Amino acid sequence: MSEILELKNISKSYGETKVLDNISFKINNNEFFTILGSSGSGKSTIIRMIGGFVKPTSGQIFYENNIINEQPIFKRPFNTVFQDYALFPNMNVSNNVGFGLKIKNVNILKIKEKVQEVLQIVGLENFSDRMPQELSGGQQQRVALARAIICEPKVILLDEPLGALDAELRKQMQLFLKEIQKKIKISFIFITHDQEEAIFLSDRIAVLNNHKFEQIGSPKDLYYSPKTTYMAKFFGECNLIACKVVDKKEDSIVVESEFGQLLINHSIDKSIGDSLTFGIRPEEIKILDQSSSNSIGVIIKDVEFRGSTSNLNVKSQHSEKYLKIQNISSNISQPFQQDDVINVELNTGVGTIFKDETIS
């Protein structure tokens, strides 16, 4: 897959305040790329720099291998969709959508033809004469997207465009955006603080933390192979267990943990006595009817009913350490009660060892 855009060693500061610290990434043609981070992490600053609204303090932005740091906004082949839509309140849908072509002096008949074409793509072909205030939030968002599409940019920048929508409409628009992006074959750079939204929409995700990218990869890579304990906790739920190596085998290690001894089916470069952190997702912990050679006993402290599933918060019998377990309701032979003692088995073969990070 060919690259269309690259940010290389980009930093941004406002006076003494650092916003971005030496970040680098590449965007591929026709890719849905999401920048995920908490509020104030610098997500929006990145796409404002790509769009030309803000200049980096240092580093270079490449479009098709050409540096565009000094290129003005109107010469960059990118369009932006903002969270507040930024529609012109005095123009109807057609005029809002066709505005970009109008300022480029495109023939009026061509504009009308193109407007109808993109309105059909976004499902608003019967709304061309409506004013923005006569539209729902989702419809306004579609108009904003149509306006971004019509000039056929190489990249569309989406700055938390679904943030103002209610939960149900947001889900509908997520599906709509995913379908549209595949249909029009334009690279999308999408900004969000919502992990589930990022997982659903994206080909790849870049997670921002402390002014830098913590990890970049596909949703599956980030979920199943987090590189840091921050990633494990931020990108989905993860139990982090402090361990000390007490025995080593060819393809596994035995560790002492806050839950007793565990056999971890990983081969790592650690010596007996070394500390490490082991991470495991709630769904990779199995509830047993009876104890086994690699099971541990835990005490149920809370049961969270979630419909088809339930989450159990359980406590070690040896310490005050807690685990979260996801249990499929259909597998429950009898209801669990607070302070019940149960046996669980950790699927240590799919967990993650953070050998250079320890937790207290």
Image (cartoon, rainbow, N blue to C red):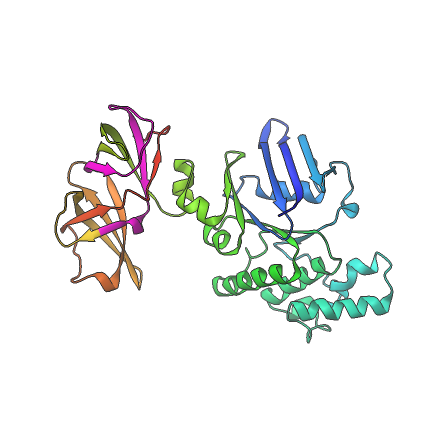
Horizontal and vertical percent position of residue 183: 63, 63
Residue 90 appears in the rendering: no
Q: Quadrant of residue 161?
A: bottom right
The reply to whether the magenta stretch includes residue 334 is: no
Q: Quadrant of residue 238?
A: top left
Left or right side of 318 for 133: right
The reply to whether the magenta stretch includes residue 271 is: yes
Horizontal and vertical percent position of residue 255: 23, 32
Horizontal and vertical percent position of residue 73: 76, 45
132 or 180, which is in the foreground?
A: 180
In the image, which residues are magenta? Answer: 257-286
Q: Residue at x 67, y 40 (%)?
A: 49
* Farthest residue, direction bottom: 126
Horizontal and vertical percent position of residue 324: 28, 47
Left or right side of 278 for 9: right
Q: Residue at x 49, y 56 (%)?
A: 200
254 or 55, which is in the foreground?
A: 254
Up-down relation of residue 63 to residue 187 (above or below): above
Which quadrant is home to the C terminus?
top left
